[in-house]
Amino acid sequence: MNAPIKAEDQFHQLIHQNHMWGLWEIASQMTPHPRPEAIAYQWKWSILKEVVKQSATAVPVGDERRAMQLFNPGLNGQWATTNTLIAAVQVLLPGEVARAHRHSPAAIRFIIQGSGAYTAVEGEKVIMHPGDLVLTPSWQWHDHGNETSETVVWMDGLDVPLTKALNAIFFEMGKELRAQNTKPVNGSQALYGHGRLSPTWTKERPQFSPLMLYSWDQTLSALHALRAREGSPYEGIALEYTHPQTGGPVMPTISCRVQMIRKGEKLKARRVTGSSVFHVVQGRGRSMIDGKAFDWEKGDIIALPSWALHAHANSGTEDAILFSISDRPVIESLGFYREQTE
């Protein structure tokens, strides 16, 4: 004779069959602090360089780009480098054009090697050089072209995982290979690339920065001008790329920063809400992330999850420079930003 089903079990069976769960069954998900599924992970330039080399013959550029996406091992095959960001390494060979398209995820390009190729954004041809930051804001037509004799490589950064989580991804392929260039070459730099000085006759104030190109020459000059300052004990000499009209982040969803860790400098550890992806522009160093050491050098890319305890140190013979993207604007606008220092 079967024992009678308890009323408690009957109740749980009823709610589960109707796609409901009691808070008492899932309360453990309300954790005392963030526990991201993404892990700290490093892509070494020694491997990326070989991937770049082999991709030139293994992968043609057609409607899709020759872009190798960096998947975080902790995210079980999701299209994501952190919970909110995807980074990739993209390669464009001499004479190639990557077809025009637009998408709702916002994107940035940080140029790693090769000079003179371009990204065309909404009719503006932006000429790219190593260290330059190029923006491709949400839903802007853009294509890439390489009219030089050099192979050009850059790091892509997009808010794809965040946009996907919000069910807000839109994509449209261009009817033509190249979008028409209707604006002066590097025109936004001529208008807005003068620090806090902006033209008075431009009345639009878009959420994203109207400056499409942040040149490495200006960035490096700013870092060196501040090198003798005390800086941040957690970031060194750290600068944020900003919207020239508002002083805010370059994108509503992506913050871009660059930091100099001076020769012999060892920074203090802290945790912050929000995730980041770092690219080593120059130098050597070591980052301790949740007790694990990551020794890095020029070209390496490192994913930093939310609330991971991290500290950077320069272990080389020159100043180290790191470029990074993060989801800080979203975290701050929602009131979720916190930090904890040792």
Image (spheres, grey):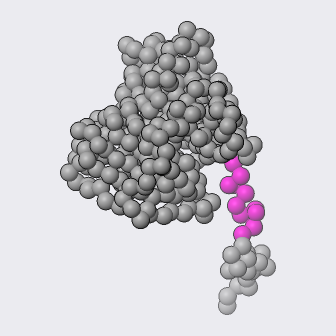
Residue closer to the observer: 205 or 299: 205
Is residue 32 placed above or below 63 in the rendered structure? above
Is residue 289 among what the camera can see? no
Q: In the image, is residue 137 part of the stretch drawn in magenta?
A: no
Note whether 101 is above or below 203 in the view shown: below
Please tell me which residue is depicted at 60% across the width and 63% down the height of the picture. Answer: 167
* Span shown in magenta: 21-31
Main structural element of the magenta stretch: helix, strand or loop? helix
Q: Position of residue 168 (x, y in %)?
A: 60, 62
Where is residue 305? Give x, y as percent: 55, 41
The image quadrant of residue 52 is top left
Question: Count of labels shown?
Answer: 0
* Front residue of 292 and 169: 169
* Quadrant the N terminus occupies: bottom right
Picture residue at 22% right of the left edge, 54% below the top? 58
Answer left or right for 334 relative to 250. right
Residue 33 position within the rendered picture, expressed as x and y whole percent measured from the top left = 68, 43
In the image, what residue occupies the spot 45% across and 27% down? 216
Residue 172 percent coordinates (x, y): 48, 64
Residue shown at 61% from the left, 11% from the top: 230
Give the residue furthest to the bottom. 1
